[in-house]
Image (spheres, grey):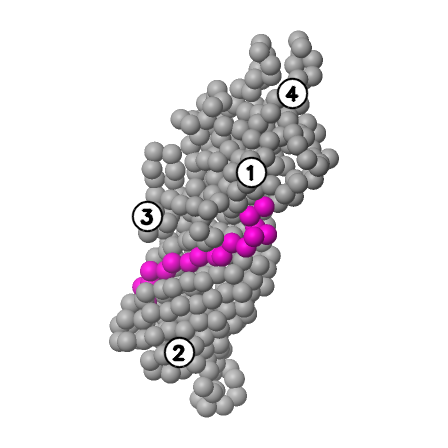
Amino acid sequence: MRKIIIYVTLIMVSIGVKAQNDIDVLLAAGVEDAQRFAKDYLAPGTNGIMHSMNANWFNSAKVKPLGGFEISVIANAVMIKDEHKAFTLNTSEYNNVQFVQGPNVQSVASVLGENEPDIFVEVQYDDPIFGTQTTQFELPQGIGSGSKNLLPTAFIQGAVGLSSGLELKARFVPNIKTDDVSLSMYGVGIQMEFTDWLPASKLWPLAVSGLVAYNHIDGSYDLTGSSGIEGENQRIENDTNTWLFQLIASTKLPVINFYGGIGYVNGESQSDLLGNYRVTNGLLTSETIVDPFSVKSEVTDVRASIGTRLKLGFFRLNAEYHISEYHAFSVGVNFGFR
């Protein structure tokens, strides 16, 4: 799980990993141009993570009775479509950036893709001594083939039954730190069963409930040791928050059950490029840019879910699939009582 967690963090802050040697040139073109590129480059990755982190909040519409509990280890992943691997870069929307070859509008790699062949752009800047100058650099690659077309998340999750048809859920990843990367995740949810509110509920072969759940991720990548730009306290920080609203139905059989429903995912992810960056303009001059920019991406999507659960005493195993802008699948190993 630790490898999955670090991988997720690198996706969340991957402009630091993939484009750290290009930030100097991007900032020389202007903060506005650098911000525009970073927003389009990162959005497919952060949006995919927001879908992935909302899988497997439930494996039944039947809530646990008072005192019943379940502990789960959950692994989720969204599938990356071709449309998520690239975005359209229109240089007419930029102030100081042009393609070295080809038309002004081209498809370039997002954080989830690769440029094949490499794509180069020309950046223009003003030198106070020598006037207008230009330089060329290669657009950053994404995680590309290294992703194997999947974006994973993983959690430890617990659930406990309360009175009045309520079940409280919580999921987390403890704060993980390496030399350059840190990550923490947590979430909380409440599920309410409506089955007894329905007429002739004892005769129904189905249970029906609703779920509201919140997820939060904090991620950070320290650029100081790897950045090619002079400066201090250079880092990228990511803050991601999502809400899930889900209607659930499931069968009420003793061993194998099926469940599904309709849900609504809403979330926002913000990535901040922070610290001091001394950007060189020509040979003799430079300027210090402090906390250059923040970029945001948002998700508002309806999803359909279907899954199955096997129950053998204290042991439960479930698998599910979600259909939305980013299709997601998930498996869970669960241990519970009642």
Residue labelled with disc 4 = 134
Residue labelled with disc 2 = 257
The image's mark for residue 117 is 1
**Residues at marks 1 and 3, CA–CA distance in whole angstroms:** 33 Å
Label 4, residues with CA under 10 Å away: few <14, some 14-19, many ≥20: some
Question: Which residue occupies 52% across, 23% down?
Answer: 277
Q: Earlier in the sequence, mark 4 or mark 3?
A: 3
Residue 169, percent from left and from top: 40, 63
267 and 125: which one is in front?
125
Label 2, residues with CA under 10 Å away: few <14, some 14-19, many ≥20: some
Q: Which residues are magenta?
A: 69-86
Q: Earlier in the sequence, mark 4 or mark 1?
A: 1
Question: Which residue occupies 47% across, 66% down?
Answer: 321
The image's mark for residue 2 is 3
Q: Is residue 274 above or below residue 328?
A: above
Label 1, residues with CA under 10 Å away: few <14, some 14-19, many ≥20: few
